[in-house]
Amino acid sequence: MTVSTDDIVRHAARLLMAGTRLDLGRMAAELGISRTTFFRRVGNRDDLMGAGLRLLSDRTWQRALDGWRAQHGDAVRTPDGRLRCLWVMEAYRREVAGSEGMRKLIEAESTVALRVLTDPRGAVQPGLVDAHVELFHADAEAAGLAPLVGLPDLAFAVVRLGESFLYSDVLAARSVDLTVATTLVDTLVRGAMEPVKVH
């Protein structure tokens, strides 16, 4: 049976979720392929960690979107007026913060993990920024809102702000406060998108 790059990345994601350190030699042996083939398929350890974390991030984002649909269908706002994107982003942050595997990774390998998670040229952050742009665009269109800044800029600012709170215990020796993060992100997004003026 041929072991594909996707097979290796899924294996890495499972290990990361379990809080298990990525040992590339051991992983190659577990998958029954040579180290040379393994490295040719996925690159170095940072590359593999990035790909695994990207897969987990994409799945978490999709669960947040699915959670919205389960509760609110195709609506763009909650009954009390909160935009879909704000709800989805909060659900995403809460799941990431509650992930035992992510906590273990950051505690055990904070420098490497934060480098991989927050690299603007890496696998994780750009994918998350793109997901935010797509959702902001959909919400702005559905709710009749005009962004005051470019959506990629807004998405980047929101993702960076989220990172600063999600990983604040490592980045700034501060406890993680998701309530404050939600207040700040919500305020930023609402302030950057205003109702379209009808002339």
Image (cartoon, grey):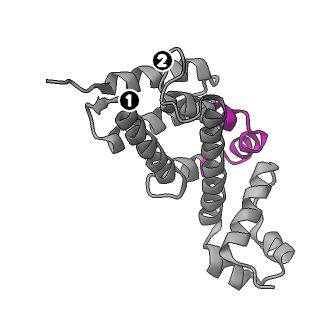
Amino acid type, label 2:
Gly
Query: Which x, y percent locates residue 5?
Result: 66, 74
Farthest residue to the left: give it. Answer: 199
> Which x, y percent locates residue 145?
32, 29
Q: Which residue is mark 2?
A: 81
Determine whether the residue tagged by mark 1 lies in a helix, strand or loop.
helix
Is residue 181 depicted above or below 127 in this figure? above
Query: Disc 1 marks which amino acid?
Result: Ala
Instruction: Tell me if residue 152 comes above or below residue 184 in the rendering.
Output: below
Question: Along the horizontal axis of the image, is 190 left or right of 54?
Answer: left
Task: Out of 11 and 186, give the one closest to the viewer.
Answer: 186
Q: Nearer the viewer, residue 45 or 102?
A: 102
Measured in 3D between alpha carbons, the distance from the residue under mark 2 to the one under mark 1, in whole angstroms, is 10 Å
Local secondary structure at mark 2: loop
**Which of pointers 2 and 1 lies earlier in the amino acid sequence?**
2
Q: Residue at x 78, y 39 (%)?
A: 100
Q: Write down the region rendered in magenta.
A: 94-113
Residue bearing the label numbered 1: 143
